């Protein structure tokens, strides 16, 4: 068997992806206080509802974004890019029709959403109707982007998608702040800018995908290929739809059961918790096509090694960060927004959502394994079971505790998801690995991170440090936990050495190109 350095060149792509997604997250987080300050918490609640609405529109994707990722990855492995080009051309037609339908439907439903769904608000109803109509336009323009990013990721060109994501996050967020500052300080102006940014994003993503595939000149619509893919992706469609419902159900319930200002605070907490996507998204975008290729190549030993080592590396970073966010949520929000009362109100919600996001992120490895193996019925069955639990749980908790109840339901659901998902996945796909994965790969990361971060929090509570110093100490504790875990996981050091070598080699190459 070849050593780790020969098999894990993918780690350098992961590190580049983390940096790119981190930039996008930092820009987005940095702009949120400006949006709240310039528009108010109620208008920010509308922005939070737009994010939820866009995710709901994603239900119409029917799993095609993930399907093209897998289909393109397999076509590339079989050296049949012509098939990938025909599939992309065929799916473009479907996505265009759906995008037009989405815009028309949301535009006509805007008054109903404003009057019947959203909670009490002091905002002008006409302004809300216009804003919701513009939400439909932005959602329609952004709708095909997942198709093109899925193509890039399936071709293992995730770096290209990261550049797109980071650049467009800057354009849409920083541009919106500038528009609000110097052009028009209204929610209407915000969504007009988002529409322009979405149009640029989809044009750029489409150009990148076709360029990577070798051009669109020879591509043609293939109804037979499209029909076959749709049939094969039927179960995946159920997986995507049920997964989106699970992740958005709490937001829909909170938005319909609380005042718009309360939903604005909940949306703020959601944004903070989504910062963990800096690690989660690039990790999944790397491991899914890699595991698909290993299944296609029939390498079970290498597949298991990649799965376990990837889990260790990922959780060594994820758990310390998530636990730090839980213990120091108020400090993060205070430093972020500069509003003490807002930080106090949103901190408990944000802390619980961060823990829930960490548990959900941990499950991305078993989920990628299920998809790569083609066992799409497993996540569908798991999601259906989770929905049966989540719906009554969220209803009761949101009704009883409001926005905080939504966060409790998210954490509870993901804890149950870990227990059920890990057991089912390993029983069917990796028999005998469940105990090793939980006790040797997951448990050390959880225990070490919990002990070090909670001990640091205990020490800090006995001092009178301000939020900046408290967060600095939390960062030190988080880095210490990660360093200890990487020392405990000896095989992880080989991967880090390779990633460092690849990164430094890339920097030297860039310098040589700049000089020449």
Image (spheres, rainbow, N blue to C red):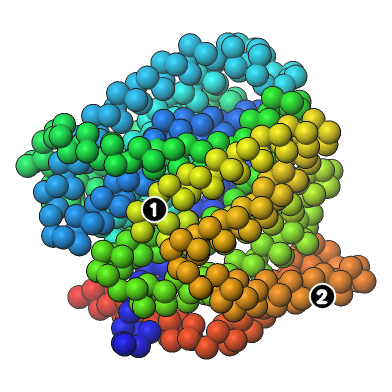
Tell me residue 101's x, y (percent): 37, 19
The residue that disc 2 covers is 455
Tell me the element at label 2.
Answer: helix
At 29% across and 46% down in the image, what residue appears?
68
| Nearest to N terminus: mark 1 or mark 2 | 1
> Which one is nearer the viewer's eye here, 308 or 23?
308
Badge 1: how crowded within 10 Å, few (<14), some, or many (20+)?
Answer: some
| Quarter of the view holding residue 423 | bottom right
Above or below residue 58? Residue 26 is below
Residue 490 falls left or right of residue 7: right
Tell me the element at label 1.
Answer: loop
Above or below residue 426? Residue 105 is above
The residue that disc 1 covers is 375
Residue placed furthest toward the left: 218
Badge 2: how crowded within 10 Å, few (<14), some, or many (20+)?
Answer: few
**Does residue 247 appear anywhere in the picture?**
no
Tell me residue 474's x, y (percent): 73, 70
| Quarter of the view holding residue 275 | bottom right
């Amino acid at each position: 068997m070849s050593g780790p350095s020969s098999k894990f060149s993918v780690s350098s792509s992961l590190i580049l992806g983390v940096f790119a997604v981190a930039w996008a997250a930092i820009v987005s987080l940095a702009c949120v206080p400006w949006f709240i300050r310039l528009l108010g918490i109620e208008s920010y609640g509308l922005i939070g509802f737009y994010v939820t609405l866009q995710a709901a529109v994603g239900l119409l994707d029917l799993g095609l974004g993930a399907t093209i990722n897998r289909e393109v990855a397999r076509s590339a492995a079989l050296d049949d890019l012509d098939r990938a080009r025909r599939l992309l051309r065929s799916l473009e037609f479907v996505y265009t029709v759906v995008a037009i339908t989405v815009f028309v439907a949301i535009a006509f439903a805007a008054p109903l959403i404003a009057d019947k769904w959203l909670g009490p608000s002091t905002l002008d109803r006409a302004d809300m109707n216009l804003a919701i109509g513009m939400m439909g336009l932005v959602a329609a323009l952004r709708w095909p982007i997942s198709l093109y990013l899925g193509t890039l990721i399936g071709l293992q060109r995730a770096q290209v998608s990261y550049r797109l994501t980071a650049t467009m996050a800057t354009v849409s967020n920083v541009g919106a702040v500038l528009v609000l500052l110097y052009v028009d300080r209204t929610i209407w102006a915000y969504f007009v800018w988002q529409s322009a940014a979405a149009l640029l994003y989809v044009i750029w993503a489409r150009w990148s995908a076709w360029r990577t595939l070798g051009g669109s000149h020879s591509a043609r619509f293939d109804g037979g290929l499209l029909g076959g893919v749709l049939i094969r992706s039927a179960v995946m469609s159920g997986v995507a739809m049920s997964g989106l419902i699970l992740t958005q159900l709490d937001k829909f319930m909170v938005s319909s059961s609380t005042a718009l200002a309360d939903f604005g605070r909940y949306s703020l907490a959601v944004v903070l918790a989504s910062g963990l996507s800096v690690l989660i998204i690039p990790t999944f975008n790397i491991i899914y096509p890699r595991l698909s290729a290993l299944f296609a190549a029939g390498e079970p030993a290498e597949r298991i090694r990649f799965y376990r080592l990837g889990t260790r590396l990922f959780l060594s970073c994820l758990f310390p960060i998530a636990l730090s966010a839980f213990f120091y949520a108020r400090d993060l929000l205070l430093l972020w927004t500069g509003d003490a009362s807002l930080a106090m109100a949103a901190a408990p919600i944000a802390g619980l959502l961060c823990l829930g996001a960490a548990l959900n992120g941990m499950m991305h490895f078993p989920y990628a394994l299920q998809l790569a193996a083609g066992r799409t019925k497993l996540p569908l069955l798991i999601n259906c079971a989770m929905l049966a639990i989540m719906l009554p749980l969220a209803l009761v908790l949101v009704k009883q505790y409001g926005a905080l109840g939504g966060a409790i339901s998210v954490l509870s659901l993901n804890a149950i998801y870990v227990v059920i998902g890990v057991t089912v996945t390993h029983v069917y796909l990796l028999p005998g690995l469940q105990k090793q994965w939980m006790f040797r790969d997951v448990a050390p990361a959880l225990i070490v991170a919990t002990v070090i971060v909670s001990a640091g929090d205990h020490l800090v509570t006995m001092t009178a440090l301000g939020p900046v110093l408290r967060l600095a100490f939390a960062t030190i504790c988080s880095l210490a936990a990660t360093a200890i875990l990487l020392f405990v996981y000896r095989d992880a050091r080989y991967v880090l050495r390779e990633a460092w070598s690849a990164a430094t080699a890339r920097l030297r190459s860039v310098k040589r190109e700049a000089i020449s």
